[in-house]
Amino acid sequence: MAVRDAIQRATLEYRYYGYRRIAVQLQREGLMVSPKKVRRLMHDDNLVAIRRRKFVVTTDSDHRFRIHPNLAQHLELTDIDQLWVADLTYLRLEQEFAYLAVVLDAYSRRVIGWELGRSLEGHLTRDALEKAITARQPQPGLVHHSDQGIQYASQSYVDRLESCGAVLSMSRPGSPWENGKCESFIKTLKHEELEARQYRTIEELREHVTEFIEQIYNVKRLHSALAYQSPVEFEKQHESERAWMPATLSFLRHKEIYSDGEFH
């Protein structure tokens, strides 16, 4: 009964945790319980979530600005501030849409800059970027990855990045998986926070987004890709005294592309 009670409390606090994350959360609280048992008890108590999907176009790639190649896919990350990923999405209010621009550190998955607004104008992404720069003070060699949207390709956005010594990288059109870490965060935000409530005003929405990002996602939410640590925990664990270096580029070798006999 104690385990069942703990599972129910955890699923209420972390509404979209699967059984693996719930098991890790309980273990961190001192309950030695296996993921298999958590899965069975969650199934018995019908602790499942209904997810819905909606789509609003936020990317306009039909513009005259320069398109940059995808460098992010070839990077080997070993530290924070080697690769930032950025994206823009819509959030539904009762009678309108709001838009959220976010910047994540790809190594730790930590949200380091974000801004919320009523339009897709360029200042939204620039404000999110400026918050990230202020918070992290990146060194030259940072790679910034995004889609090919006009907000990220605009001259003012590119100039701000280049003033920090950053290099730009962009996904191909219609390839959201090339910015998967940012897409994953947006999916988490919508499923675990926003779809559970109805928001009437952008001020109410901002309050809940702030709480989710700064008090839950960055600090408490466990990530399987981070060995079930939160982004803040992961960064503290991987603090290094060695000098920061840019990420290295790693390309596939000939034999990794062509098997024997396929190319001569």
Image: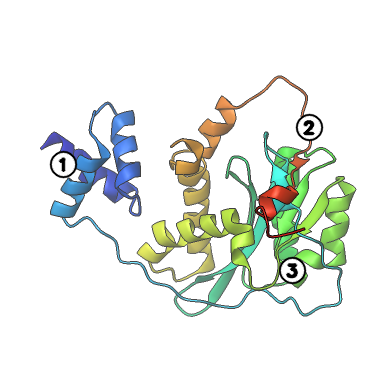
Q: Which residue is mark 3?
A: 148
Q: CA distance from mark 2 to mark 1?
A: 47 Å
Residue at disc 2, secondary structure: loop
**Which residue appears farthest toward the top when viewing the image?**
241
Tell me which numbered mark, 2 or 3, is placed earlier along the sequence.
Answer: 3
Above or below for 15 versus 218: below
Dot 1 and dot 3 residues touching (CB under 8 Å): no
**Residue 4 image label:** 1
* Residue 116 in sight from this viewpoint: no
Marker count (numbered): 3
Image location (x, y in percent) of residue 74: 72, 49
Q: Position of residue 232 (x, y in %)?
A: 54, 35
Residue found at x 58% / y 53%: 181
For mark 3, does the 10 Å Cα neighbourhood hold few (<14), some (14 to 19), or many (20 or more) residues?
many
Between circles 2 and 1, the one closer to the viewer is: 2
**Residue located beneath label 2 in the image:** 245
Mark 2 in CB contact with mark 3 (< 8 angstroms): no
Give, as a three-letter code, the residue at label 2. Answer: Met
Q: Residue at x 63, y 74 (%)?
A: 58
Counting from the top left corner in percent of width and height, residue 115 is at 64, 58
- Residue at figure coordinates x 87%, y 65% from the top left: 155
